[in-house]
Each structure stands twice: as C-alpha cells, then as structure tokens.
Image (cartoon, rainbow, N blue to C red):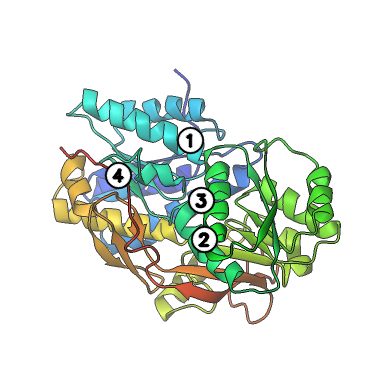
C-alpha cells in the first residue's frame, strides 16, 4: 500500500504527546490536498492554516469532550481524483473519521461519492467530508449527501455577488469568461452566462473558453485573444499557478480593465501581481482581513504570521471548519460516531472568528455567510499577503448571501 505523505509532523507528535499525558484521545482530521506539483503552494498554505487553527482554537483551549486533542494528518493527493481515493482509503484504514479537502471540485466529486458509498457499506466505520473550498454547485444540489458539508460559498453564490457589481458598472459592455477545464471551471462559466443574462442582457460575452488545468505554461495565446475581443472585463475561476499565469499574461499584454476572480490572492499570487494588480484584480470571498474586524481576529493573524512568516490566512473559512467541528463534537458527546456529529453540524449557527454569522443550511449542508468583493491594493493594508505590502480590502458585501436560494438536494438521512 502506498505510504502517506506527512507534513507538520513535529506539531502532530507534540499534540499527540500532550493528549497522551493528559489521558485524552487524539481526534485525527485527514487533510487531502496537493502538497507537490504546480499547486503545492496552495495546499501547503492550507495545511498550515489547519494545523494552526487546530492548535490555537481547540487544543490550547482544552480540546473537546474530556480534553481530546485535534491532530491534522496530511495526505498528498497531487490534485488527482484517483490519488485522492487512494489516500482516502489510507486515512480510513488508519481510523480517521474526518476528511478535509478543498482544492479542486473534481477531487471533491470523487471523494463525496466514495465516502457515501463507504458509509453505506460500513455503518460502523463511517466518515464525514468537510469540504472547505470545492465550490461546484452540484455538491450541494443533485450530488448532495448527508456526509458532505461545504464551508465555502458555492460557485453560483459567488458569481451572483460578482455579477451584481458588474451589472452596476455601465462601462462594461463586453465580458470575456475563461477558466480551467474541469467541473468547477465549467460551473463558473455557466453561472456567469446565466447571471449576466438575467441582470444585464445587453452585455456581450465575447469569449467563453476553458483551458487544461495545471498544464498551460504560457498564457500569451489566451491573452492575445482576450485583447483582440476588446473585452471590458474578464471573469475567471482560475486558482494557483493558473491564476498567476493568466493574470500576468493579460496585464503584460496591455489589459487595464477589471479582472473578476475567485482566488487571485496569496500563495505567491499577490506578490506576482504587485502594482500591476491595483485597480484591476477583484476577488469574491468570505472573511474580512483588512481592516481586522476585532482584536481577536487581529491577534490570531499576528500569531499565525509569527509561526509561519511566509504563510497567509487566505482561507478564513478554515477556522470556521475547526470551530464548528469542535462545537458539533461537544454537542454530540462523541467523536467516534460521526452520525450525531453530522446532525449537530446540520443547521448549526455560529459566530465566526472573523465577526460574521454562519449557518450550515440543514437542507443541503451548504454554509450561508456574508460574501465580500475585495480589491487588490496596498492602501491601508494591515495584513498583507506574500510579505509583499499588497493585500485585500473589502469593496462591498452581500449579507448572508443566498440564504433563501433554492436547492435541488434530496438528502437521505440515517
């Protein structure tokens, strides 16, 4: 059997030793995401955010139940659905009951199906899927299941917020849509076409194309097509190296309009854009970093940077996963049986570290929260990304976005 790739081993061993000394158990959370290859930076930074959240928000607060500690165990899936399924089985064989994954909806679709099948066949050995960033709408619609919880706004919710901003800008008459060729990229494109058609039918979509994920080395041909289209705005769901490659290429080829994105921040992206991104890069996401919403949030970020000087809290939702899971385990009175933990999570309301209210919608296990449109800037940034002097500031906010949105989920509950 293939061995597991482990990172943060010192942290894990320290936490395990502390738990043993106190006579407590260790509750392991498998982190299955890319830790090698072109998206390693994104996965590694996410892992550090999980490790830090588990230590600061749970373990240093006395743990859960009778002092049980959280331990994050890292598995490298190389951004491959096939490899993810192998690592999922390794995690299950190690007795891990909680699976965290976020990078790539293609991976998430494979995991949610495999976990649902595993739980049907192994009622005494069930696991929960804590999806912190894979935003294909199907995961909480037609492909929903009781074992899957999404802690990020889905692609439709985010596009609804982005297109509100675009629709209000009379200077935008032509839009170019481009993204990665897999389920998430396709969902972003479909949502852009739908929402723009509803809100601004006069806007012309002058390009709508997909490119291979993680394989394009030179985005110049795409940038030239965008420039030739005379697009007033670009919409992309690209992330990681593909976001850097696309964004830098269009800006270097003379594009000066807004670039509306889902993931154009941190993990080297902010530093790569620097001055060139000011006035162009817009990002839709949860969590307000600048200015800090409260002293607790500021102290948390400062402590994270002290431990990981090159890291960024680019996914505020990771703290939500850890806090809400701990809360659910305490409410359920057990971590071994994930069924009562899942029932505790479903419908849970929680005030986040970042000062906003959260609700895990019971009907489809989609988190409902405030969604912000951020701007890339170096003006008044308290916490920058990539130690670059540049970061994100909130331009506008949609409060409890999509709280009443419909879902096609028909969930079967145990």
Can you tell which quarter of the image residue 327 is in?
bottom left
| Cα distance between the residues tagged 2 and 4 | 24 Å
| Residue for badge 1 | 107
| Residue for badge 2 | 198
Dot placed on the residue nearer the N-terminal end, 4 or 3:
3
Dot placed on the residue nearer the N-terminal end, 1 or 4:
1
In which quadrant will I find the N terminus?
top left
10 Å crowding of disc 2: few (<14), some (14-19), many (20+):
few
Position in image of residue 187 (x %, y %):
52, 45
> Pointers 3 and 2 in contact (CB under 8 A)?
no
In which quadrant will I find the C terminus?
top left
Please tell me whether mark 3 sits on a helix, a strand or a loop.
helix
Q: Residue at x 55, y 64 (%)?
A: 162
| Cα distance between the residues tagged 3 and 1 | 16 Å
Dot placed on the residue nearer the N-terminal end, 2 or 1:
1
Position in image of residue 282 (x %, y %):
63, 66
Position above or below: 138 against 349:
above
Between 3 and 80, which is closer to the camera in this rendering?
80
10 Å crowding of disc 3: few (<14), some (14-19), many (20+):
many
10 Å crowding of disc 4: few (<14), some (14-19), many (20+):
some
Please tell me whether mark 2 sits on a helix, a strand or a loop.
helix
| Cα distance between the residues tagged 3 and 2 | 35 Å
Between 199 and 378, which is closer to the camera in this rendering?
199
Position in image of residue 85 (x %, y %):
43, 27
Please tell me whether mark 4 sits on a helix, a strand or a loop.
loop
| Cα distance between the residues tagged 1 and 4 | 20 Å
| Residue for badge 3 | 46
| Residue for badge 4 | 409
Tell me if I can see residue 305 in this picture.
Answer: no
| Cα distance between the residues tagged 2 and 1 | 31 Å
Tell me if I can see residue 152 in this picture.
Answer: yes
Dot placed on the residue nearer the N-terminal end, 2 or 4:
2
């Amino acid at each position: 059997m293939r061995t597991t790739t482990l990172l943060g081993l010192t942290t894990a061993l320290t936490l395990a030793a502390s738990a043993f000394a106190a006579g407590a158990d260790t509750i392991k959370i498998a982190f299955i995401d890319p830790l090698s290859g072109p998206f390693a930076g994104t996965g590694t930074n996410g892992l550090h955010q999980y490790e830090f959240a588990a230590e600061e928000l749970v373990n240093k607060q006395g743990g859960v139940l009778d002092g049980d500690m959280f331990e994050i165990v890292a598995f490298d899936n190389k951004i491959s659905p096939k490899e993810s399924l192998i690592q999922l089985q390794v995690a299950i064989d190690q007795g891990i009951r909680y699976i965290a994954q976020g990078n790539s909806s293609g991976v998430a679709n494979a995991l949610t199906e495999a976990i649902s099948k595993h739980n049907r066949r192994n009622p005494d050995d069930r696991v929960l899927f804590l999806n912190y960033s894979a935003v294909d709408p199907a995961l909480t619609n037609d492909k929903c299941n009781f074992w899957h919880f999404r802690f990020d706004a889905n692609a439709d919710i985010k596009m609804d917020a982005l297109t509100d901003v675009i629709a209000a800008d009379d200077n935008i008459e032509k839009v170019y849509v481009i993204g990665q060729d897999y389920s998430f990229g396709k969902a972003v494109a479909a949502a852009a076409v739908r929402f723009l058609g509803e809100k601004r039918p006069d806007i012309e979509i002058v390009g709508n194309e997909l490119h291979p994920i993680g394989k394009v080395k030179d985005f110049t041909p795409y940038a030239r097509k965008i420039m030739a289209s005379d697009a007033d705005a670009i919409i992309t769901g690209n992330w990681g190296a593909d976001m850097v490659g696309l964004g830098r290429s269009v800006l270097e080829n003379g594009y000066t309009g807004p670039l509306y994105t889902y993931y154009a921040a941190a993990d080297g992206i902010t530093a790569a854009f620097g001055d060139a991104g000011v006035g162009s890069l817009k990002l839709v996401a949860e969590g307000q970093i600048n200015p800090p919403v409260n002293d607790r949030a500021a102290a948390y970020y400062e402590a994270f940077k002290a431990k990981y000087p090159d890291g960024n809290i680019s996914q505020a939702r990771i703290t939500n996963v850890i806090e809400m899971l701990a809360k659910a385990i305490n409410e359920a009175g057990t971590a071994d049986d994930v069924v009562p933990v899942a029932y505790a999570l479903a419908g849970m309301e929680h005030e986040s570290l970042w000062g906003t209210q959260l609700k895990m919608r019971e009907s489809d296990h989609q988190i409902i929260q405030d969604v912000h449109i951020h701007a890339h800037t170096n003006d008044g940034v308290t916490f920058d990304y990539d130690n670059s002097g540049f970061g994100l500031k909130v331009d506008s906010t949609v409060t409890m976005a999509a709280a009443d949105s419909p879902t096609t989920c028909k969930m079967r509950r145990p």
